[in-house]
Image: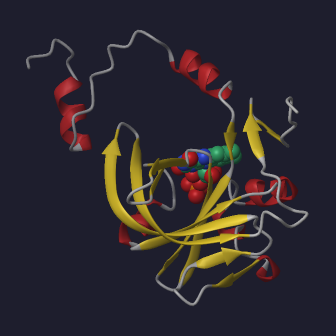
Amino acid sequence: MISDQPNAGSARELAGVDVPADTSGITAEQYRAAMRHYPTGVTVVTLRHDDNPIGFTASSFASLSLDPPLISFNIAHSSSSIRALHASDSVVIHFLGEHQRHVAQRFARSADQRFADQSLWTWLDTGEPVLYGTPIWLRVTIHQLIPVGDHTLVVGLVNRVEDVTDSPTGAPLLYHHGRYHRPTPIDE
Ligand SMILES: Cc1cc2nc3c(=O)[nH]c(=O)nc-3n(C[C@H](O)[C@H](O)[C@H](O)COP(=O)(O)O)c2cc1C
């Protein structure tokens, strides 16, 4: 297809996949404002790279397929974790509880401080870092990395589920409008 957008072709080549040229007509502010209104859960993705623990807060987690059990999340190309993710075969995805707001904040700030507190995490026998006190975590092997726009979509196969949501710390942490929330039921 011939485009009259001067940079459309090169943007596609850079991404290596079929990314539409930006003819959307919406501004970044409009996009951000709409996305801020969409509520999400909060996860921390962790992995091991060159014997170092790597991790970041991610709200882009989604359940993708039951058979086989697949999940997805997105990582920004500007993320300091992207090189490690490309080199890794597996990650652990923690669904944070309402008591873990400080963990969400820690894993969204300076990368060199994220694992500085040794009392917050340990190594799994399979090699990934795991955070103590998380209501649910999944061990996931990476199935596909798909660069799309300014992020890479990561598709992973779940091969371990640890679930302690029947404990008092079971309620999930939520993110909406740039703030953390706890769930409040509105039905019976
Ligand atoms: C609630 C929340 C959700 C986030 N979700 C994502 C996400 O899905 N993908 C992503 O790459 N970064 C996400 N981030 C940003 C990362 O946690 C991190 O701050 C950012 O990648 C910068 O990290 P760096 O300094 O290691 O590059 C999120 C941050 C917050 C606070």
Residue placed furthest toward the right:
168
Residue at position x 32%, y 58% from top? 144
Viewed as shown, does residue 113 lie left or right of 53? Answer: right
Residue placed furthest toward the bottom:
125
Residue at position x 46%, y 83% from top? 50
Q: Nearer the viewer, residue 70 or 112?
A: 70
Residue at position x 77%, y 82% from top? 118
Viewed as shown, does residue 187 lie left or right of 74? Answer: right
Q: Nearer the viewer, residue 24 or 95?
A: 95
Q: Quadrant of the C terminus?
A: top right
Query: Where's residue 97, x and y in %?
Result: 79, 57
Residue placed furthest toward the front:
188
Query: Where's residue 46, x and y in %?
Result: 58, 68
Q: Is residue 19 above or below residue 181?
A: above
Viewed as shown, does residue 134 lie left or right of 152? Answer: right
Query: Where's residue 175, x and y in %?
Result: 74, 39
Viewed as shown, does residue 55 lie left or right of 18? Answer: right
Q: Is residue 54 above or below residue 67?
A: below
Query: Where's residue 92, x and y in %?
Result: 56, 69
- To which quarter of the image does residue 7 belong? top left
- To which quarter of the image does residue 103 belong? bottom right
Q: How is the image coloured?
A: secondary structure
